[in-house]
Image (cartoon, grey):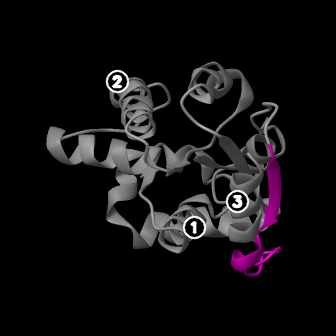
Amino acid sequence: MLVVVSGPPGAGKSTLAHRLARAIGCPAVCRDEIKEGMVHAAGEFTAAPGDELTLRTLPVFFGVVEQLLRAGVTTVAEAAFQDKVWRPHLLPLAGPADIRVVHCQVDAGTAFARIRRRQGDVPTRRAHDDLSLLAPEVHAARHEGFRRVRIEVPEIEVDTGAGYQPGLDEIVAFLNAARSTA
């Protein structure tokens, strides 16, 4: 099974992806963490929209996910899966995997506060162009303009504003129920 965890920046995707992976007992592959590892290896780096490492991250991310799926490993994959960019890369994985989508959602104000907080608290965030999101009006426009991935697979909406709604146990039950009926 491929569990796709998606949502706009600051929606709580990475935290939920890691919690789901622990609850299910499988790896979490997070696009941002791959890029952060590339930045660590590269040393000097300045993040910008469409920078070289961002472009290199996409094929590495999907290569790792595909290799795990072809080996028969249930995998949680997390990224800001916007439809136009990500659907063409997810559809070929429907062959080797049973895909389920977890859509994270939160209001723009909460997402903005999370982005500001992690910019100061998480040194590896220098790998990402988060600074362009720090103007409230820019962030709000991008948040509202987020177009989530649309593929014909079971999906669940999760509000991450104050904990998880539905709760983690319910999300795991959704994933396990989908698996047992496949």
- Of mark 2 and mark 1, the one earlier in the sequence is 1
Q: Is residue 18 rendered magenta in the image? A: no
In the image: residue 156, left or right of residue 27: right
Q: Residue placed at 79% from the left, 50% from the top?
A: 140
Element at label 2? helix
Residue located beneath label 1 in the image: 20
The crowd level at tag 3 (other Cα within 10 Å; few <14, some 14-19, many 20+) is many
Disc 3, disc 1: CB below 8 Å? yes
Residue 133 percent across, percent down from the top left: 61, 48
Q: CA distance from mark 2 to mark 1?
A: 31 Å
Local secondary structure at mark 3:
helix
Q: How many marks?
A: 3
Q: What residue type is disc 2 on?
A: Glu
Q: Which mark is residue 28?
A: none
- Foreground mark, 3 or 2? 3
Report the mark closest to the observer, 3 or 1: 3
Whether tag 3 and tag 2 are in contact, CB under 8 A, the answer is no
Disc on the earlier residue, 3 or 1: 1
Quadrant location, the C terminus: top right
- Residue denoted by label 2: 52
SS state under label 1 = helix
Q: Amino acid at mark 1?
A: Leu
**Which of the 4 image quadrants contains residue 160?**
bottom right
Percent from the top left, x then y, of residue 179? 69, 53
Q: Which residues are magenta?
A: 154-170
Q: Earlier in the sequence, mark 3 or mark 2?
A: 2
Residue 175 has which mark?
A: 3
Residue in the foreground of this view, choosing between 79 and 90: 90
